[in-house]
Structures are given as structure tokens and as C-alpha cells.
Image: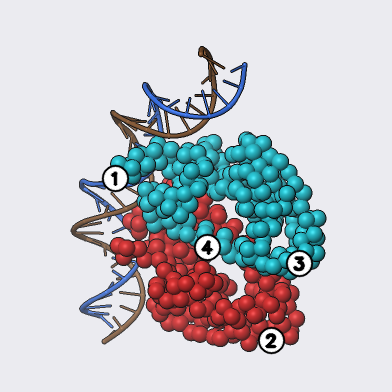
Chain colours: A red, B cyan, C blue, D brown
DNA sequence: ATAGAGGATTGATCTATATCAATTCTATTT
DNA sequence: AAATAGAATTGATATAGATCAATCCTCTAT
């Protein structure tokens, strides 16, 4: 149940077994079926979720009804609308399952209390947030400075698992291009070799 | 010297005066003249800097020699190549002054020691990193989901000070468009009213 | 095994933005 | 004040990627 979580935490900080026991008490498990929502536009994001198993996506829907993938989360990733979760404001994003998933969920109150009680967790999240900033920054630069093809190649190289596991139309959305354009880019690349 | 820093920190966490005194010891002041580098592509980012006064920019230069603005920092902002600073790897970014600046600089060792000694600072940076993630996420979405004009209008509305204080060609770069396109967008907007 | 639905591909066109080049405007240096 | 360099604007043209539409695949449910 907590295997993935603790193995992930132990990559960043060391926990005593007492701390591990305490941490467990803050989480409630939840299963999510494919296509089921974890968060819908208009709700407050009440939980920060850790993915023990499965695959979720986090996205907005614009005025015209088009979906824009912000990111994906599978085994070993945290997912939430950070802003809504922390501020209590209504979210403008959606989270749902691409594949059946098993989650560990924590409320804001639990999250804050856990960090007070277990200082290593404060550190763990600071590190996580740092890494998150770095990867968002990279993605931002690539969206500003590179062509669609360059972005796709960079993604497929740095994150081949993502390209394999996630449907192409969602990857296109993640890259900010249409599925047609992505299809042509892929054709073009294989053609080059 | 430390006015802006402590007023910024006090917006997020409470410090005792002993803590304030201790924190001061970790920083060294530095003045930067317009166009002077704080960090150059190829160096390791040795300092995290807080801007007491002035205006800096953080950017990459691509293979073709074009600059891409990642962000700007003025009074009350922190600036560094977070990745290089934390990992010790060589940076691929540049930081220089758009306007003469006064900085407070801290090394990685100082940074980590300060957070151990003053737990409120661990909290302060966790909050800062959270906010940073939120704003990067918003920018990312806007770059994926919106047109150049929409992005400019959103920026000018949410951050009018930025549009006033920073030269147009740098704003264009920040938005991921050419200066010509930005000029036309601005013309088009004023024309609409 | 078959039907249906969603996903991927391909083709034909359109459009936002880039590129290149010239001109004007503005600020800084001498 | 004149000279110069860097910004910003404007025009003409090119191009990456979008849009629309048709067809083909490939799962999944029955």
C-alpha cells in the first residue's frame, strides 16, 4: 500500500520507523477507475494525492471546450492543483485517470501537520518543489525557444516512457500542438533515419 | 541594506530578532552595474541572490545566438539558476543587470545551514517554491493554450509594472515572440479601443 | 467474430507568426 | 549639439502549424 511512497521518500530524506508509522496515519487510500475524476473544474482541490499505481492527467478546458494537458502522473508522482489545494480557492483544472489508479491522499490540514511533526517531510517537499520548478522551467524554455519537432524529440528522448504509455493525442496537447501536427512530425522523424 | 529582504520574509513567516541577526551573517552584499553579469553560461551558479534594488534578467542563448528571457527580477525577488545552484553543475543560463542593482548573496552551504538553524526559513522557501510553481504553471498553460495577443494582454493586465519597466524587445522574448510581432499586437490593441 | 467508437493518418487549404529589409524614433556618448 | 547605436515601427513575403474533412486503424464491448 505504502511501498512506492516510502521508497520515493527514502530517495530524498531518511525517516525513522516511528516517523513512517506517523506519516501513514495522515493518508487515506483511494482507488480510481479509468476516466473517473479526482478533481473537477469548479471544485476546491481538497487532496494532494500520491500515485501508488496507475496513470492520471492534469489539464484545463478552455472556452472553446478544448483540453490542454498540463502534466501526467504515474507511480511515484504527486498530483493536485497546488494552488487550489493550498489556497482553498476553487480550481479551474481537472484531474482524472487515464488508467485505473491507486492513490494515497492527504488533506491540507494533514499535510501541514505532518510537516510540523516530521521536519524531514518539510525538507522532502522543499526538495520536491525545487525539482518541480526546475522541470517546469525547462519545459517553459522549450515552449518559448523551440519548434514543435524539437520539443517532441526532446520529450521522447528525455522521457521515452511517457511517449510509450500516453496516447498520442494527449501528448500533442501536452506539447501545445494538434494531433495532426504530431502525427506529421513523427512521420517526418522516422523518414529521416 | 536588509530592509527589502526582511520585509519580504515577514510577509510569509515570523522571525525573532536573534534569528534576523543570524540570517544577516549568511549574506554578502554585492552591487551590479547595468549590463554586468551575475552568472554566465558555462559557470556554476555559486549564489542565490536577493534583489534589494534594481532589475535583472535571467535568460538562455540558443545555438543561433538568440536570447530567450526566462524571467526578470527586481526589488523583492530571488534570482539564481536554481538547478546549477543546488546541483553544482555548470549552468547554461545567464543573469545580468538591466538596471544598476544591489544584491544580497548567499552560497549553497550558507543556504542549507541557514535552513537548519532557522526552521522558519525552511518554511519560507517552501512557500516561495510553491508560489513559484504556481506561477510557472500558469505561464506554461498560457504558452500552450493561448495566442500571442492573449498572452500579451494577460501579462500587461496581471503585471503592468513589468510591461512598463522592461524594454519591449525583452518582453517579446519573454512571451516567445519576435519584437515585430509584439509591436503589431500593441498597435492592434490600441486600435481596438 | 462483429460492430462501434475513439485514435491516428493523410490531404488540401488557411492563418498566425516569423523573417528580412527599410525607416523612424530615442537615448547615450563624445 | 552632433554622432552613433540601439529600439521600435512598418511593409512585403515566407513558413510552421492549425483547421477541416475523409479514411484508415485498433481496441473494446457485445
Cβ atoms at labels 3 and 2 below 8 Å apart:
no
Question: Does mark 2 fall on the same chain as mark 3?
Answer: no
Q: In front of the other: label 1 or label 3?
A: 3
- Name the element at disc 2: helix
Q: Earlier in the sequence, mark 1 or mark 3?
A: 3
- Name the element at disc 4: helix
Task: Say which quarter of the image contains residue A75.
Answer: bottom right
Location of residue B50 in the rendering, given as x and y in whole percent from the top left corner: 67, 51
The residue under label 1 is B192
Work out how far the residue at label 1 is from the one at label 3, CA to CA, in angstroms: 53 Å
Cβ atoms at labels 1 and 3 below 8 Å apart:
no
Work out how far the residue at label 4 is from the one at label 2, CA to CA, in angstroms: 31 Å
The chain that hosts pointer 2 is: A
Which residue occupies the foreground of this view, A94 or A114? A114
Work out how far the residue at label 2 is from the one at label 1, CA to CA, in angstroms: 62 Å
Q: Earlier in the sequence, mark 4 or mark 1?
A: 4
Q: Residues within 10 Å of mark 3 (few under 14, many from 20)?
A: few
The chain that hosts pointer 1 is: B
The chain that hosts pointer 3 is: B
The residue under label 2 is A21
Figure check: B173 above or below D14 = below
Q: How many marks?
A: 4
Q: In front of the other: label 4 or label 3?
A: 3
Question: Does mark 2 fall on the same chain as mark 4?
Answer: no
Work out how far the residue at label 3 is from the one at label 2, CA to CA, in angstroms: 33 Å
The residue under label 4 is B134
Cβ atoms at labels 2 and 1 below 8 Å apart:
no
The answer to whether A183 appears left or right of B139 in the picture is: left
The residue under label 3 is B16
The answer to whether B133 appears left or right of A119 in the picture is: left
Amino acid at each position: 500500500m505504502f511501498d512506492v511512497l516510502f521508497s520515493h521518500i527514502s530517495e530524498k530524506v531518511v525517516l525513522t520507523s516511528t516517523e513512517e508509522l506517523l506519516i501513514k496515519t495522515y493518508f487515506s487510500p483511494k482507488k480510481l477507475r479509468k476516466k473517473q475524476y479526482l478533481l473537477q473544474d469548479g471544485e476546491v482541490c481538497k487532496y494532494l494525492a500520491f500515485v501508488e499505481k496507475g496513470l492520471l492527467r492534469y489539464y484545463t478546458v478552455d472556452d472553446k471546450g478544448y483540453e490542454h494537458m498540463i502534466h501526467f502522473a504515474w507511480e511515484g508522482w504527486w498530483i493536485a492543483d497546488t494552488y487550489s489545494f493550498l489556497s482553498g480557492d476553487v480550481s479551474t483544472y481537472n484531474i482524472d485517470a487515464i488508467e485505473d489508479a491507486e492513490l494515497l491522499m492527504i488533506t491540507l490540514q494533514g499535510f501541514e501537520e505532518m510537516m510540523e511533526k516530521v521536519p524531514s517531510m518539510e525538507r522532502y517537499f522543499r526538495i520536491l518543489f525545487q525539482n518541480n520548478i526546475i522541470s517546469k522551467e525547462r519545459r517553459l524554455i522549450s515552449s518559448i525557444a523551440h519548434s514543435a519537432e524539437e520539443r517532441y524529440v526532446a520529450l521522447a528522448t528525455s522521457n521515452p516512457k511517457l511517449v510509450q504509455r500516453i496516447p498520442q493525442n494527449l501528448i500533442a496537447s501536452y506539447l501545445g500542438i494538434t494531433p495532426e501536427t504530431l502525427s506529421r512530425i513523427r512521420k517526418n522523424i522516422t523518414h529521416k533515419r
